[in-house]
Image (tube, coloured by chain):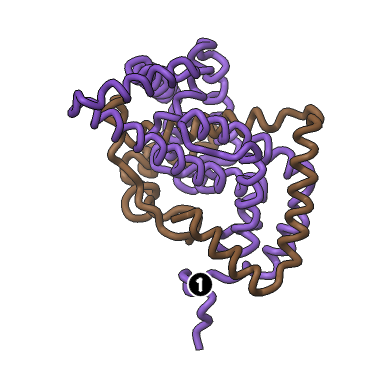
Amino acid sequence: MADPTRDGSHPGPPPPDALRALDEQYTDAVRDQAHRYAEQRAKRVRRAGWPTPSNYAEELVHDALASIWMGTRRWDPRRTPLYFRLCSIIKDRTWHEIKRAQGRKHVLFDIAANDSAIGGDVEASLAAGASAGDLSPVVLAALTLRVVEALRELGNQDERARVILAAWAEGFIERDEVLAVTRLTPHAYDAARQRILRLAKRLPPELREAGHDLLRRVS
Amino acid sequence: MSDDWCSPTGEFEPARGGDASGEGARLRNRGETPVELDDEGDPMLGATGGELRMVDAFFHEVALDDAADPRPPTPAEQLAVDNLRTRFERLKAMTPDEQAAERERLLALDR
């Protein structure tokens, strides 16, 4: 008889070896590192205007861990270290929250464009956002395109970076996924990834800082 | 000549219809709930859905690098680490009923 806890709609706990690996790998060092990563994603969610508690980064890490422990998210310890799986789950959740927050802003923007009677409220809201460090849609669009262009320019000069960027554009972010779809060797992947990351250091300071704001607009 | 690049013809490039394209690209996280990619992009930003995912992945990698900073945790970070350890112990000690409730809560987060 089929196990109802394994049909996807009623997820059950992961296999014992995965639970054992999780217990072993979820060390203080991993908790600390995952929390630091989550802090950066939490900032982006807050800037997107999504309401979050003050300990949101801690919530993100715990929920990611609990989702593996409870079997609502999968993890194969033979393929990915726990830390990277936690980060990809956190990224996935925060990406959707940023999108939902941005969707709300778009609705407001569209309403304002079509209803002059309430336009003043939206203008006031945008002004409040600007005073809180938000970027105007026009400036943000220009910054987004600058980052896209910088990545594309790198891709044009660097074949291996280009295939990694293409994988990212398709939604593959975990190292083993990117290795699988690009057929790069681990060494080639690591080297190309470092070249891509060096781009972040070469970005003008205002653009790098704007990167934090950028994702509040990512739809 | 030794070359660690396996596909000089580019036939496996995701953007050209390799392993990363098509239906397979819509399945994420190795068997988790299939996720339909949002390819609508953002007309206000003038970027496609793929470009936005690429930029998000870029800042994800930057955040991973920043998080790897070997400095010791601040007091606030240490407190978070302690809380996370305690919460994990609590998670492991949950009764079956508590586990079912927790599983429902987690599933709701992904909806």
Check the image and name the residue furthest to the bottom.
A1
The image shows residue B15 at horizontal and vertical percentages of 34, 39
Q: Position of residue A86 (x, y in %)?
A: 62, 48
Q: What element carries label 1?
A: loop
A19 is higher (above) or lower (below) than B79: below
Identify whether A216 is placed above or below B14: above
Q: What color does chain B have in the rendering?
A: brown
Residue at the extreme front of the image, as rendered: A117
Is B46 situated left or right of A74 in this image?
left
Chain where mark 1 sits: A
How many numbered circles does the render carry?
Answer: 1
Amino acid type of disc 1? Answer: His
Q: Which residue is drawn at 18% across and 28% down?
A: A114
Chain letter for purple, please.
A
User: From the image, which quarter does the C terminus of chain A lie in?
Assistant: top left
Residue holding disc 1: A10
Indicate the position of residue B82 as horizontal and vertical percent values. Answer: 80, 45
- Please report the residue visible at 32 percent of the width from the left and 16 percent of the height from the top: A138
Q: Foreground residue, B90 or A141? A: B90
B96 versus A59 height, above or below: below
- Residue B83 placement (x, y as % from top left): 76, 47
